[in-house]
Image: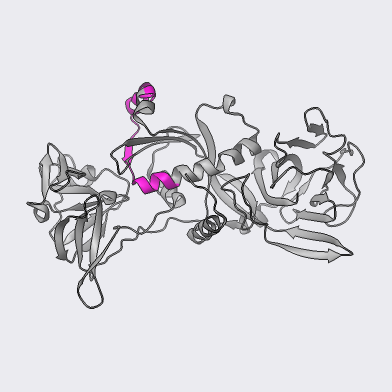
């Protein structure tokens, strides 16, 4: 079967790349030709060419064809061929030929090449790498938009329609108590016309909620359904309310209240979430940063996500507009230039560069898992790892993306579950527009998500 998707991971320090080539089913009688300028995948009357000389030259010195194969290369002169269908170690379907390593997955749908490089053009790589910055948090209202605050569980109106001046908390992931109730300093009390906001919470004057919420110790609950909405800061200085426990009502164009309730914030992608978390986090060493995230499911179930993130960014080259959510499921062909020569199709595959992070993660999503991993959770708490509450939707999105890329990492790094403590994945830094476009394609193809 022709290739569906290509991902290249780079290790610039030792001039090495791993090239992962994915196809929708086992391919037989294919030939993989490696030359200084790139790679050719030849199967029946189809040839797919990966031209890499723009970024680096592959070291093919001393490489001999393990058997048969074709001459020629991606772009011109002769190269060396790996023919998995014939003599590339039929017992375990892997081979080691000088500067080229070849490995195929047992399912036959993933082929990995490890290639030594002669040189790397860092400027060309950087120029073709997508740069993703931190976007501002976006509320669904501004100072000119009157809103009513409702309980997100039972939809009871908590605060009638009024206008607020939104104020961003300088560090959106910091503990609200540290900002509004600093030690040995005068507390910051929000006025009744202000809403302060962070990553997943708002801070508001408690007088606005008199008579519609119940205070239980330091927690705030909806009077109607007793859903916990947030916490009391200091000695009643302010209320910190979780954004995913609330919703807002707005006015229609004719000035009448809308029957449709909406979330306070516009969606935050897992990439934007991770960039914010890493920006504000304090690394535990030069190599790693530790994040401890929690959320509460709508049915009240507590969920924990432990993340150990490598501080050094990864660098990937990836075929354009390919779906990586399910390596065995429907895939979209890479965007490419296609030629037809005497019944023979030639496809030039284009690549884009992306940065990202490598993450070891563990999820505890049931009472049984929380109990079984109590010692590990306690250890992280004893080590002083701050626990940050995010919305359930953020948690689902982040874990979904990590789960989707988990097998990608296992193929690229040749990992097996037995080798790992927890699970290992990449989070690839994509623009919001790319993420939303990919979701549309996944919905159209029926790809399953977490």
Q: Position of residue 345 (x, y in %)?
A: 82, 60
Outermost left residue:
211
Q: Position of residue 61 (x, y in %)?
A: 86, 40
Q: Quick check: is 61 in the magenta stretch? A: no
Outermost bottom residue:
254
Whether residue 165 is visible to the viewer of this picture, yes or no, is: yes
Along the horizontal axis of the image, is 288 left or right of 317?
Answer: left
183 or 238: nearer the eye?
Answer: 238
Q: Quadrant of residue 281?
A: top left
Outermost front residue:
446
Q: How is the image coloured?
A: one colour
Q: Quick check: is 378 in the magenta stretch? A: yes
> Across the whole image, how many numbered discs are drawn on residues?
0
Magenta span: helix, strand or loop, mainly?
helix
Q: Quadrant of residue 96?
A: top right
Q: Residue at x 78, y 46 (%)?
A: 58
In the rendered image of this protein, does residue 428 appear above or below residue 143?
Answer: above
Q: Position of residue 390 (x, y in %)?
A: 34, 45
Q: Residue at x 19, y 64 (%)?
A: 164
Q: Position of residue 198 (x, y in %)?
A: 29, 51
Along the horizontal axis of the image, is 237 left or right of 331?
Answer: left
145 or 289: nearer the eye?
Answer: 145
In the rendered image of this protein, does residue 341 appear above or below residue 120?
Answer: below
Q: Which residues are magenta?
A: 372-397
156 or 433: nearer the eye?
Answer: 156
Whether residue 277 is visible to the viewer of this picture, yes or no, is: no
Q: Residue at x 78, y 55 (%)?
A: 49
């Amino acid at each position: 079967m022709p290739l569906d998707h290509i991902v290249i991971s780079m290790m610039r320090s030792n001039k090495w790349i791993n090239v992962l080539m994915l196809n929708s089913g086992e391919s037989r009688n294919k030939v993989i030709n490696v030359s200084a300028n790139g790679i050719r995948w030849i199967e029946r009357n189809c040839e797919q060419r990966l031209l890499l000389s723009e970024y680096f030259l592959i070291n093919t010195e001393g490489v001999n064809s393990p058997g048969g194969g074709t001459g020629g290369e991606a772009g011109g002169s002769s190269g060396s061929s790996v023919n998995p269908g014939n003599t590339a170690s039929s017992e375990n379907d892997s081979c080691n030929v000088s500067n080229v390593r070849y490995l195929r997955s047992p399912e036959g749908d993933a082929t990995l090449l490890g290639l030594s490089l002669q040189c790397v053009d860092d400027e060309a790589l950087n120029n073709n790498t997508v740069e993703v910055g931190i976007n501002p948090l976006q509320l669904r209202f501004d100072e000119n938009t009157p809103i009513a605050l409702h309980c997100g569980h039972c939809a009871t109106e908590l605060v009638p329609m009024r206008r607020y001046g939104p104020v961003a908390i300088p560090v959106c992931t910091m503990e609200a108590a540290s900002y509004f109730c600093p030690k040995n300093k005068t507390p910051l009390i929000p006025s009744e016309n202000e809403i302060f906001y962070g990553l997943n919470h708002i801070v508001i004057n408690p007088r606005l909620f008199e008579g519609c919420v119940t205070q239980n110790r330091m927690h705030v609950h909806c009077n109607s359904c007793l859903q916990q909405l947030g916490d009391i800061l200091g000695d009643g200085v302010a209320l910190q309310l979780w954004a995913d426990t609330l919703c807002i009502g707005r006015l229609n164009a004719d000035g009448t209240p809308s029957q449709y309730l909406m979330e306070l914030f516009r969606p935050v992608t897992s990439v934007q979430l991770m960039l914010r978390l890493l920006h504000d986090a304090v690394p535990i060493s030069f190599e790693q940063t530790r994040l401890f995230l929690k959320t509460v499911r709508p049915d009240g179930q507590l969920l924990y996500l432990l993340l150990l993130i490598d501080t050094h960014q990864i660098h990937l080259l990836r075929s354009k507009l390919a779906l990586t959510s399910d390596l065995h499921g429907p895939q979209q062909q890479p965007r490419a230039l296609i030629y037809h020569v005497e019944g023979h199709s030639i496809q030039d595959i284009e690549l884009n560069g992306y940065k990202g992070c490598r993450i070891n993660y563990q999820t505890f999503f049931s009472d049984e898992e929380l109990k079984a991993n109590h010692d590990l959770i306690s250890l992280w708490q004893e080590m002083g790892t701050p626990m940050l509450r995010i919305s359930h939707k953020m948690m689902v999105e982040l874990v979904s993306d990590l789960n989707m890329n988990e097998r990608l990492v296992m193929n690229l790094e040749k990992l097996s579950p037995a080798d790992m403590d927890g699970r290992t994945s990449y989070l690839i830094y994509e623009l919001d527009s790319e993420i939303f476009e990919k979701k549309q394609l996944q919905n159209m193809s029926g790809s399953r998500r977490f």
